[in-house]
Image (cartoon, rainbow, N blue to C red):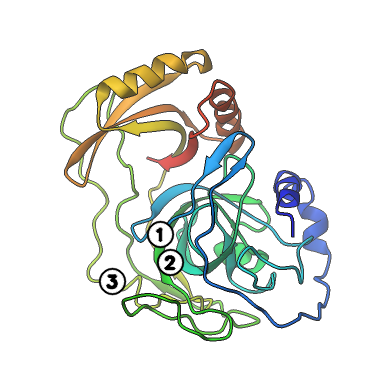
Amino acid sequence: MSRSLRHVFAVAAVAGLATACASPQPTVSLPPSAGVYKVGNPYQIDGTWYYPHEQPDYDETGIASWYGPTFYGKRTADGEIFDANALSAAHRTLPMPVNVRVTNLDNGRSLVVRVNDRGPFAKGRIIDVSERAAQLLGFYREGTARVRVTYLGRADLPNGTPQPDETPVQVASALPAAPTGKIDVTKLDALPGTPVAAAPAIDPLPSPLPTPEPAELDSNLTPTGQVTRVPVPAVTHLYVQAGAFGSYDNARRLTERLKGAGGLNISSIDRNGARLYRVRMGPFDAVSQADAALARVTALGGTDAQIVVDR
Protein backbone atom coordinates (compact mmCIF):
# COMPACT_ATOMS: atom_id res chain seq x y z
CA MET A 1 0.00 0.00 0.00
CA SER A 2 1.34 3.44 -0.84
CA ARG A 3 1.50 5.68 2.19
CA SER A 4 1.92 8.72 -0.04
CA LEU A 5 -1.87 8.84 -0.24
CA ARG A 6 -1.96 9.32 3.50
CA HIS A 7 -0.25 12.66 3.14
CA VAL A 8 -3.09 13.78 0.90
CA PHE A 9 -5.61 12.67 3.50
CA ALA A 10 -3.73 14.27 6.38
CA VAL A 11 -3.88 17.64 4.64
CA ALA A 12 -7.54 17.25 3.74
CA ALA A 13 -8.70 15.63 6.99
CA VAL A 14 -9.83 18.77 8.80
CA ALA A 15 -11.77 20.08 5.82
CA GLY A 16 -13.68 16.82 5.57
CA LEU A 17 -14.33 16.28 9.26
CA ALA A 18 -18.01 17.21 9.12
CA THR A 19 -18.65 14.60 6.45
CA ALA A 20 -16.44 12.04 8.15
CA CYS A 21 -18.20 12.47 11.48
CA ALA A 22 -21.62 12.06 9.90
CA SER A 23 -20.75 9.01 7.81
CA PRO A 24 -20.96 5.55 9.44
CA GLN A 25 -17.87 3.40 9.16
CA PRO A 26 -18.27 0.64 6.58
CA THR A 27 -18.22 -2.99 7.61
CA VAL A 28 -15.04 -4.53 6.26
CA SER A 29 -14.22 -8.22 5.98
CA LEU A 30 -10.62 -8.31 7.10
CA PRO A 31 -8.20 -11.04 5.99
CA PRO A 32 -5.88 -12.52 8.60
CA SER A 33 -3.23 -10.11 9.80
CA ALA A 34 0.36 -10.97 8.94
CA GLY A 35 2.27 -8.35 10.89
CA VAL A 36 5.98 -8.78 11.54
CA TYR A 37 8.41 -6.95 13.77
CA LYS A 38 10.50 -4.47 11.79
CA VAL A 39 12.61 -1.38 12.24
CA GLY A 40 12.71 -0.42 8.56
CA ASN A 41 15.16 1.25 6.20
CA PRO A 42 15.85 4.98 5.86
CA TYR A 43 13.45 6.76 3.52
CA GLN A 44 12.94 10.25 2.16
CA ILE A 45 9.82 12.39 1.87
CA ASP A 46 9.76 15.93 0.48
CA GLY A 47 13.50 16.35 0.92
CA THR A 48 13.63 15.05 4.50
CA TRP A 49 15.34 11.77 5.39
CA TYR A 50 13.86 9.63 8.17
CA TYR A 51 15.93 6.94 9.90
CA PRO A 52 13.87 4.31 11.74
CA HIS A 53 15.70 2.90 14.77
CA GLU A 54 15.20 1.54 18.27
CA GLN A 55 14.23 4.44 20.55
CA PRO A 56 13.52 3.16 24.08
CA ASP A 57 13.95 6.70 25.46
CA TYR A 58 11.61 8.35 22.93
CA ASP A 59 9.66 11.20 24.55
CA GLU A 60 8.56 14.11 22.37
CA THR A 61 5.90 16.77 22.10
CA GLY A 62 4.24 18.01 18.93
CA ILE A 63 1.04 17.96 16.92
CA ALA A 64 -1.01 14.77 16.43
CA SER A 65 -3.53 14.13 13.67
CA TRP A 66 -5.74 11.15 12.84
CA TYR A 67 -6.29 9.05 9.73
CA GLY A 68 -8.62 6.30 8.61
CA PRO A 69 -11.45 6.54 6.06
CA THR A 70 -9.42 5.60 2.97
CA PHE A 71 -7.47 2.78 4.66
CA TYR A 72 -10.10 0.41 6.04
CA GLY A 73 -8.92 -3.17 5.56
CA LYS A 74 -5.58 -2.27 4.01
CA ARG A 75 -2.13 -3.32 5.17
CA THR A 76 -0.13 -1.18 7.56
CA ALA A 77 3.63 -0.76 7.18
CA ASP A 78 4.36 -3.83 9.33
CA GLY A 79 1.81 -6.01 7.52
CA GLU A 80 -1.11 -5.75 9.94
CA ILE A 81 -4.64 -4.85 8.87
CA PHE A 82 -5.72 -1.28 9.49
CA ASP A 83 -8.80 -1.08 11.71
CA ALA A 84 -10.21 2.36 12.50
CA ASN A 85 -11.66 1.02 15.76
CA ALA A 86 -8.33 -0.35 17.00
CA LEU A 87 -6.05 1.76 19.16
CA SER A 88 -3.24 2.09 16.63
CA ALA A 89 -0.97 4.80 15.27
CA ALA A 90 1.56 5.70 12.59
CA HIS A 91 5.01 7.06 13.42
CA ARG A 92 7.94 7.97 11.17
CA THR A 93 10.87 6.34 12.96
CA LEU A 94 9.81 4.07 15.83
CA PRO A 95 10.11 0.30 15.27
CA MET A 96 6.86 -1.61 14.78
CA PRO A 97 4.85 -2.77 16.54
CA VAL A 98 5.49 -0.90 19.78
CA ASN A 99 3.23 0.65 22.39
CA VAL A 100 3.38 4.37 23.15
CA ARG A 101 1.45 6.66 25.46
CA VAL A 102 -0.18 9.64 23.76
CA THR A 103 -1.21 12.47 26.08
CA ASN A 104 -3.44 15.25 24.81
CA LEU A 105 -1.88 18.41 26.29
CA ASP A 106 -5.05 20.37 25.52
CA ASN A 107 -7.32 18.35 27.83
CA GLY A 108 -5.14 15.97 29.89
CA ARG A 109 -6.48 12.75 28.33
CA SER A 110 -3.80 10.04 28.06
CA LEU A 111 -4.06 6.75 26.15
CA VAL A 112 -1.83 3.83 25.14
CA VAL A 113 -1.79 3.06 21.40
CA ARG A 114 0.01 0.54 19.21
CA VAL A 115 2.37 1.91 16.53
CA ASN A 116 2.12 -0.38 13.49
CA ASP A 117 2.33 2.01 10.54
CA ARG A 118 4.49 4.73 8.96
CA GLY A 119 3.46 8.38 8.91
CA PRO A 120 2.29 11.03 9.31
CA PHE A 121 3.47 12.52 6.05
CA ALA A 122 2.33 16.05 6.88
CA LYS A 123 5.58 17.75 7.91
CA GLY A 124 4.29 19.40 11.08
CA ARG A 125 2.85 16.29 12.76
CA ILE A 126 4.60 13.73 14.95
CA ILE A 127 1.98 10.96 15.08
CA ASP A 128 -1.19 9.84 13.28
CA VAL A 129 -3.66 7.93 15.44
CA SER A 130 -6.70 5.87 14.47
CA GLU A 131 -10.18 7.37 14.52
CA ARG A 132 -11.10 5.54 17.74
CA ALA A 133 -7.93 6.77 19.46
CA ALA A 134 -8.68 10.35 18.36
CA GLN A 135 -12.19 10.02 19.79
CA LEU A 136 -10.93 8.78 23.16
CA LEU A 137 -8.23 11.46 23.27
CA GLY A 138 -10.85 14.10 22.55
CA PHE A 139 -9.61 15.65 19.30
CA TYR A 140 -11.57 13.75 16.65
CA ARG A 141 -13.66 16.76 15.64
CA GLU A 142 -10.80 19.25 15.79
CA GLY A 143 -8.53 17.04 13.65
CA THR A 144 -5.32 17.87 15.52
CA ALA A 145 -4.11 18.24 19.11
CA ARG A 146 -0.98 19.19 21.03
CA VAL A 147 0.38 15.94 22.40
CA ARG A 148 3.21 14.24 24.19
CA VAL A 149 4.26 10.83 22.86
CA THR A 150 6.24 8.49 25.14
CA TYR A 151 7.67 5.05 24.26
CA LEU A 152 6.49 2.25 26.55
CA GLY A 153 7.80 -0.99 25.04
CA ARG A 154 7.52 -3.56 22.28
CA ALA A 155 4.13 -5.08 21.54
CA ASP A 156 3.19 -8.64 20.66
CA LEU A 157 2.85 -9.56 17.02
CA PRO A 158 -0.74 -9.97 15.76
CA ASN A 159 -0.70 -13.76 16.22
CA GLY A 160 0.36 -13.38 19.84
CA THR A 161 4.01 -14.22 19.26
CA PRO A 162 6.29 -12.23 21.58
CA GLN A 163 8.62 -9.76 19.93
CA PRO A 164 12.19 -10.93 19.29
CA ASP A 165 14.33 -9.46 22.05
CA GLU A 166 17.07 -10.48 24.46
CA THR A 167 15.15 -9.20 27.48
CA PRO A 168 11.56 -9.72 28.67
CA VAL A 169 9.13 -7.14 27.35
CA GLN A 170 5.67 -5.94 28.27
CA VAL A 171 3.36 -7.80 25.89
CA ALA A 172 0.15 -6.36 24.51
CA SER A 173 -3.24 -7.99 24.76
CA ALA A 174 -5.54 -8.22 21.77
CA LEU A 175 -7.09 -4.88 20.84
CA PRO A 176 -10.79 -4.70 21.74
CA ALA A 177 -13.21 -3.84 18.95
CA ALA A 178 -14.79 -1.14 21.11
CA PRO A 179 -12.32 0.14 23.74
CA THR A 180 -13.73 1.19 27.07
CA GLY A 181 -14.02 4.79 28.12
CA LYS A 182 -12.93 4.37 31.76
CA ILE A 183 -10.97 7.36 33.02
CA ASP A 184 -8.45 7.28 35.87
CA VAL A 185 -6.62 10.22 37.37
CA THR A 186 -2.89 10.44 38.02
CA LYS A 187 0.12 12.73 37.47
CA LEU A 188 2.45 13.18 34.51
CA ASP A 189 6.08 14.27 34.75
CA ALA A 190 7.51 17.36 33.10
CA LEU A 191 7.12 18.08 29.40
CA PRO A 192 10.36 17.25 27.59
CA GLY A 193 12.13 20.44 26.64
CA THR A 194 10.53 22.79 29.17
CA PRO A 195 10.96 25.49 30.22
CA VAL A 196 12.46 27.98 27.75
CA ALA A 197 15.30 30.28 28.71
CA ALA A 198 16.02 33.60 27.02
CA ALA A 199 18.63 33.27 24.28
CA PRO A 200 21.50 32.89 24.76
CA ALA A 201 21.21 33.10 28.56
CA ILE A 202 22.42 30.24 30.72
CA ASP A 203 20.79 31.25 33.98
CA PRO A 204 19.37 28.49 36.20
CA LEU A 205 16.09 27.20 34.83
CA PRO A 206 12.85 27.21 36.85
CA SER A 207 11.65 23.97 38.42
CA PRO A 208 9.72 21.71 36.03
CA LEU A 209 6.34 20.17 36.70
CA PRO A 210 6.49 17.66 39.58
CA THR A 211 7.62 14.12 38.84
CA PRO A 212 4.96 11.54 39.76
CA GLU A 213 5.28 8.92 42.46
CA PRO A 214 6.20 5.44 41.11
CA ALA A 215 4.62 4.67 37.80
CA GLU A 216 0.89 4.78 38.45
CA LEU A 217 0.53 6.21 34.96
CA ASP A 218 2.30 3.30 33.30
CA SER A 219 0.84 0.49 35.39
CA ASN A 220 -0.99 -0.46 32.21
CA LEU A 221 1.33 -0.53 29.19
CA THR A 222 -1.00 -2.03 26.61
CA PRO A 223 -3.79 -0.59 24.42
CA THR A 224 -6.84 -1.51 26.53
CA GLY A 225 -8.77 1.69 25.81
CA GLN A 226 -8.39 2.98 29.37
CA VAL A 227 -8.17 6.78 29.29
CA THR A 228 -6.14 8.39 32.05
CA ARG A 229 -6.61 11.99 33.18
CA VAL A 230 -3.33 13.78 33.92
CA PRO A 231 -2.58 17.39 34.90
CA VAL A 232 -1.17 19.46 32.06
CA PRO A 233 0.08 23.06 31.88
CA ALA A 234 -2.76 25.59 31.83
CA VAL A 235 -1.14 27.28 28.85
CA THR A 236 1.16 25.77 26.21
CA HIS A 237 2.65 27.26 23.07
CA LEU A 238 3.94 25.93 19.77
CA TYR A 239 7.52 26.42 18.61
CA VAL A 240 9.33 25.52 15.42
CA GLN A 241 12.60 23.92 16.49
CA ALA A 242 15.22 23.82 13.75
CA GLY A 243 17.85 22.02 15.81
CA ALA A 244 19.43 21.43 19.23
CA PHE A 245 23.18 21.41 19.88
CA GLY A 246 25.64 20.90 22.68
CA SER A 247 27.69 23.76 21.22
CA TYR A 248 26.42 27.33 21.21
CA ASP A 249 28.57 28.07 18.15
CA ASN A 250 26.80 25.35 16.17
CA ALA A 251 23.43 26.77 17.18
CA ARG A 252 24.54 30.24 16.13
CA ARG A 253 25.71 28.98 12.73
CA LEU A 254 22.35 27.35 12.07
CA THR A 255 20.58 30.54 13.09
CA GLU A 256 22.65 32.50 10.58
CA ARG A 257 21.98 29.98 7.81
CA LEU A 258 18.23 30.13 8.36
CA LYS A 259 17.92 33.82 9.24
CA GLY A 260 15.84 34.45 6.12
CA ALA A 261 12.94 32.65 7.84
CA GLY A 262 12.82 35.46 10.41
CA GLY A 263 12.30 35.26 14.16
CA LEU A 264 14.78 32.50 15.03
CA ASN A 265 16.45 32.65 18.42
CA ILE A 266 18.59 30.45 20.63
CA SER A 267 17.30 29.13 23.96
CA SER A 268 19.11 26.88 26.41
CA ILE A 269 18.00 23.94 28.52
CA ASP A 270 19.68 21.36 30.75
CA ARG A 271 18.99 17.80 29.62
CA ASN A 272 20.47 14.74 31.34
CA GLY A 273 23.17 16.83 32.97
CA ALA A 274 24.21 18.59 29.74
CA ARG A 275 23.30 21.99 28.37
CA LEU A 276 21.60 22.10 24.98
CA TYR A 277 21.17 25.15 22.77
CA ARG A 278 17.97 25.07 20.76
CA VAL A 279 17.34 27.07 17.60
CA ARG A 280 13.67 28.01 17.70
CA MET A 281 11.00 30.25 16.27
CA GLY A 282 7.90 31.21 18.24
CA PRO A 283 5.90 31.03 20.40
CA PHE A 284 2.77 30.47 18.32
CA ASP A 285 -0.74 29.87 19.60
CA ALA A 286 -2.32 28.49 16.41
CA VAL A 287 -1.30 25.37 14.51
CA SER A 288 -1.68 27.28 11.23
CA GLN A 289 0.90 29.83 12.39
CA ALA A 290 3.37 27.11 13.36
CA ASP A 291 2.78 25.30 10.06
CA ALA A 292 3.56 28.49 8.11
CA ALA A 293 6.74 29.11 10.11
CA LEU A 294 7.83 25.50 9.62
CA ALA A 295 7.35 25.86 5.86
CA ARG A 296 9.61 28.93 5.82
CA VAL A 297 12.37 27.14 7.74
CA THR A 298 12.10 24.02 5.59
CA ALA A 299 12.27 26.05 2.37
CA LEU A 300 15.64 27.42 3.49
CA GLY A 301 17.08 23.94 4.05
CA GLY A 302 16.02 23.31 7.63
CA THR A 303 14.69 19.87 6.80
CA ASP A 304 15.16 18.61 10.38
CA ALA A 305 12.88 21.31 11.80
CA GLN A 306 9.79 20.22 13.69
CA ILE A 307 6.92 21.67 15.69
CA VAL A 308 7.19 21.15 19.44
CA VAL A 309 4.92 22.01 22.37
CA ASP A 310 6.33 23.96 25.30
CA ARG A 311 5.21 26.31 28.02
In this image, 287 relative to 153: left or right?
right
Res 215 label: 3
Q: Residues within 10 Å of mark 1 (few under 14, many from 20)?
A: few
- Cα gap from disc 3 to disc 2, whole angstroms: 14 Å
Q: Residue at x 23, y 71 (%)?
A: 214
- Residue 236 appearing in the image: no
- Please name which of the two marks, 3 or 1, marks the residue nearer to the observer: 1
Question: Residue 17: image x %, image y %?
Answer: 76, 53
Indicate the amino acid at tag 3: Ala
Q: Residue at x 65, y 51 (%)?
A: 142
Is residue 269 shown above or below 139?
above
- Cα gap from disc 3 to disc 1, whole angstroms: 22 Å
Indicate the amino acid at tag 2: Arg
Indicate the amino acid at tag 1: Glu
Q: How many marks?
A: 3
- Cα gap from disc 1 to disc 2, whole angstroms: 28 Å
Is residue 261 shown above or below 192?
above
Quadrant where the image shows the N terminus: bottom right
As helix, strand or loop, the secondary structure at mark 2 comes to strand
Which residue occupies the extreme front position in the image?
Answer: 41
In this image, 311 relative to 47: left or right?
left
Q: Quadrant of residue 185?
A: bottom left
Provide the residue designation for mark 1: 54
As helix, strand or loop, the secondary structure at mark 3 comes to loop
Q: Residues within 10 Å of mark 3 (few under 14, many from 20)?
A: few
Question: Residue 293: image x %, image y %?
Answer: 55, 26
Provide the residue designation for mark 2: 229
As helix, strand or loop, the secondary structure at mark 1 comes to loop
Q: Residues within 10 Å of mark 2 (few under 14, many from 20)?
A: many
Is residue 186 shown above or below 309?
below
